Every structure is written in structure tokens, then in C-alpha cells.
Amino acid sequence: MSFCTVLSAAVQGLSVEMIRVEADVSNGLPMFHMVGYLSSEVKEASERVRTAIRNSGMKLPAKKIIVNLAPATVRKRGASFDLPIALAVLAAMNYVPEEALKGVAVIGEVSLEGKIRGVSGVLPIVMEAKNQGCTACILPEENEIEGRLVSGIKILPADNLEKLCAYLNGDEKEIHRKKQGRSSAQRNIFENKKEDFSDICGQNAVKRAAEIAVAGGHNLLMAGPPGSGKSMIARRIATILPELSLEESLEITRIYSVLGMIDKEQPLITRRPFRSVHHTITKTALVGGGMTPRPGEISMAHGGVLFLDELAEFPRNVLEVLRQPLEEHQIHIARNYGNFTFPAEFMLVAAMNPCPCGNYPDMQKCSCTPSQIQKYLGKISQPFLDRMDLCIETPKVEYRELDIERIGKKEEESSEVIRSRVVEARKLQKKRYEGTQIRTNSMLGPGEIRTYIPLGSAERKLMEKAFERMGLTARTYHKILRVARTIADLDYSEKVTEKHLKEAIAYRSLDKKYWGR
């Protein structure tokens, strides 16, 4: 045998392209040449593979070795092609039987001494290998637990090249026993510590708005003076988010796998992500992209919460890139060598001061000029503001809310109590939208709104009056109806009544107060 093909895979954004690693060993001038639209790190694999084979007790003959990674139109990056290249060359030289590699996907980095090292992006690769009909996947022992998250495909972990070759030649003892991950009760990177809504004194209206936002998957904007609890409330929103389903866990884990940000011992992400970004973030870091497009903070918040603190401090051009993902729940990035799509179904939570000093509209304390206030608030454009479903003011906390004696007599609602109501509201939505792609009320389009939120004559008159007096846009009109539907769900009401609409309308009053819109 002088020719062999081994299956591997290349990660392009979040999608996976199966790659055929072809090796040909023939007579001619001794060389190890690789082709197939390779990046520099893949080209370097020839030296790593040649040295690893020698240090694993096998000899490369003085032959002409050509390795091709097909299709040649797909750019290959990373060190995950080391192991498939090594096995393709060894099979072409009859060190391992080609039959043992039929229907097997191979990924892994190889060190100079022949050790097989872990790589990122294993979960989506194993998923795609299964979809393409592969029966097994050879991967680094470090990635074993991650690979076993996919059922229906055999996982063959390997820690060094010599033992792997022995296994492929029939010595089954050489494959390491199945590794056990940590208990599922172990905390993962998204689990909150001891934060709880019961820590927040007062601010009942803001907590109510947060509950509605989570129950319907709505976006939330909080504005108020420094120290009024905006950031504190935002961080505790993560404690009332509903549990992830297995399908959602795998979808989120897939994103973090590509980024190399998962726990090797407990790779499955079981908590909804909460991403808090600084106002110095760039557009690329927020939405993703770069020379080699990778998911950004928006996609990392998929299925969870993206928190923007000090919203008015963000550059306006950075905030504007959020508009399209908030509507489409996807990010499309175009490059001259391909188009990439990243998921972006997240809940946006933002907090801001009403002016640079934070005291507006209390003009006795505010030291800002009208032009400074206008410039500060002007960073938030009307189209961006329209995409916020709930806008709520967080007033200054009064002493009586912080008084130790009073606090000892009055218990604030815990996150567990609030979360139980959120879960019940989500169950109603799941039942209502069964058989559709809609998961929460925030995902309702204009057509679905007419179907699922029918209004009576009194409700229509109320909305007509609000539309005219508040100068609502079509987008804000629909958002009010979606929020009202969520309020009705929390009230266990099948119909959206005037009471629910009035509360939803109240969450648009902040626009008029600060922006005069």
C-alpha cells in the first residue's frame, strides 16, 4: 500500500467541513510535501509528524511523501490535522491497516515525542462526523469526555501515537479506559455563587420589570443614579433564568468548544451564560469576525444574557451593530473566502446613568449642562432604544429600605421564588407555541402577534390612544403587545386585558422622560 485516505474535519466559524487527508508514498527524491490550501500552522505539521513517528519507534523510509488535504477550496487551520496526517502516512507505509480507519474521523495534535494533545472544536466535529455516517472518532484523551457528549458514535481516545498504532493493529488493551467526568452537581463556569434577589432592598418595580423580561425573553434597560442597584439587579437576573434543555446545552457548548473555553473535565454547559462586557469593547469583539471569523460576545451570550453596564459610555457605532442581531437572532459575516453565520438569540440587559454625573433630572444635584446631558443621552439612538422592550427607572434607594432593623422584619423575595413564576410562564409559552419555531413571547412576529394576542375593542382603543399620544413606532407598538402577553402569562391569564397593556405601556415612559421621544 502506498496510498491511503483518512477522514478529518475543519471548523469554519461554527460549521464543520469534512476533510479527506490523502497520503501517497512513492519512489523519488526524498521529501515530505503538503498541499491543500494550508495555513502556516498546518504546513508545520510535516516536521511535527515526521519527528513524532520517529520518536514513536517507527522509521520513515527515504521516499517521496505527498500529503493532500481535500477539498483544496477550504482553508485549513490549526494543529488538529497532525494526527490524521500521521495515520494517513503510516497507513500508506503499512504500519497500520487501512481497513481500521474506514468510517473513522480523526482529529488531534501530535507533539514531537509522539504524545497526542487536545484541540478545540471537538464537539461540533464529532456531531458532524456522526451526521456524515462515521461510526467512530479518534481524538485526544484530553477531549474524551467532550466527545462522549454525542451519542450514537464510538469514541476512541488516544494519548500517544505508539499506543494508537498498536490498537489499530488489533491490541485493544492499548486504548485507555473510559474517563469519567466530574459529578454534574459540580459547579461550572456559568453557575452563580451566592447572588440572590433577596440581597436587593426595595426597588420592587425594577425587580418586577426584570421578572417580566426573563419570563418573556425581553430586552431590559435600566436608568438611574449611581448606587441605585442597576448592576446588582442585572447580575442577579442570571439566578432566575430557566434551566437549559439538553438540546440548548449542546448548542451553547458547541460555541464554547470552538472558542476553546470549556472545562475539559465537565464540558457540558448546564447554566445559561451571563456575559458582561466593558464599554471599551470593539465591534469585532462584540459581534465576532476577524481575519479568521470567530464568535463574539453576542454569540457567547446565546441562550442567556448579554449585560452592557454604563450603556451611554459605549461608542455609538458599537451599539448600532447590536440592532440587526437583536431582530434576526443571527449574525452574518461575509469574507472573500466564505460567509459565516453565528447564533445570537440572547436577552440584552443594559444599565446607564441619566447624565455624566448621574443625578439628572434632579437639577439641585446635577452639575451637567444641558448640552452635556443631550450629548450623553444622544449616544442612544432611537432605533436602538426601540429594540429595548422594557425601559425602567431605578430611583435612589431610601434609607428606610436599608435600615437594618426594618430589614430584619421584612424579607425580600428570593431568586428561587421569582424563578418559579418565570418557569411557569415559560411553560405556558412552550405549550402555546408548540409545533412552531417560537420559544418565547419576544420572538413573536407581526403575523404571530395577530394570531396569539387578539385584542378586544377596549384594548384596541387603549392601544390606539397610546400610539397617538406617545408617538409610538410600529416596532414599539409590537413590543408593547409582546410584553403585555408576558405580563398576562405571569398573571395566568389567557387573554391580554387593559390591565396588562397599561403596565406594558408604562415601560415605555422612560423614552419620553429622558429622550423626549
Image (cartoon, grey):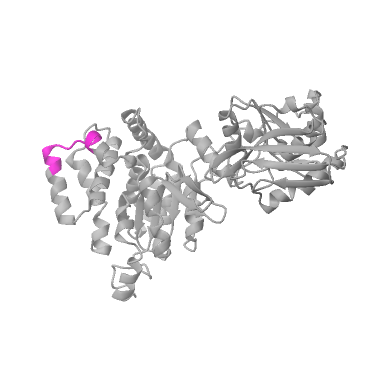
Across the whole image, how many numbered discs are drawn on residues? 0
The residue shown at (76%, 38%) is: 24
- Kindly tell me whether residue 304 is visible in this rendering: yes
Q: Residue furthest front?
A: 28
Residue 378 placement (x, y as % from top left): 32, 67
Q: Nearer the viewer, residue 410 or 341?
A: 341
- Kindly tell me whether residue 410 is visible in this rendering: no
Question: Is residue 424 depicted above or below 302 in this figure?
Answer: above
Q: Quadrant of residue 493?
A: top left
Q: Is residue 174 left or right of residue 385?
A: right
Q: Nearer the viewer, residue 403 or 488?
A: 488
Question: Is residue 428 depicted above or below 59 in this figure?
Answer: above
Q: Is residue 140 left or right of residue 503?
A: right
Q: Nearer the viewer, residue 118 or 266?
A: 118
The residue shown at (23%, 51%) is: 506
Q: Is residue 453 in the magenta section?
A: yes
Residue 475 placement (x, y as % from top left): 26, 50
The residue shown at (35%, 38%) is: 440
Q: Quadrant of residue 430?
A: top left
Q: Is residue 16 left or right of residue 286?
A: right
Q: Is residue 33 left or right of residue 435?
A: right
Q: Is residue 344 in the magenta section?
A: no
Picture quarter with the C terminus: bottom left
Q: Quadrant of residue 150?
A: top right
Residue 41 placement (x, y as % from top left): 70, 51
The magenta region covers 450-460
Residue 395 placement (x, y as % from top left): 32, 59
Q: Nearer the viewer, residue 87 or 150?
A: 87
Q: Main secondary structure of the magenta part?
A: helix
Picture quarter with the N terminus: top right
Question: Is residue 428 depicted above or below 71 in this figure?
Answer: above
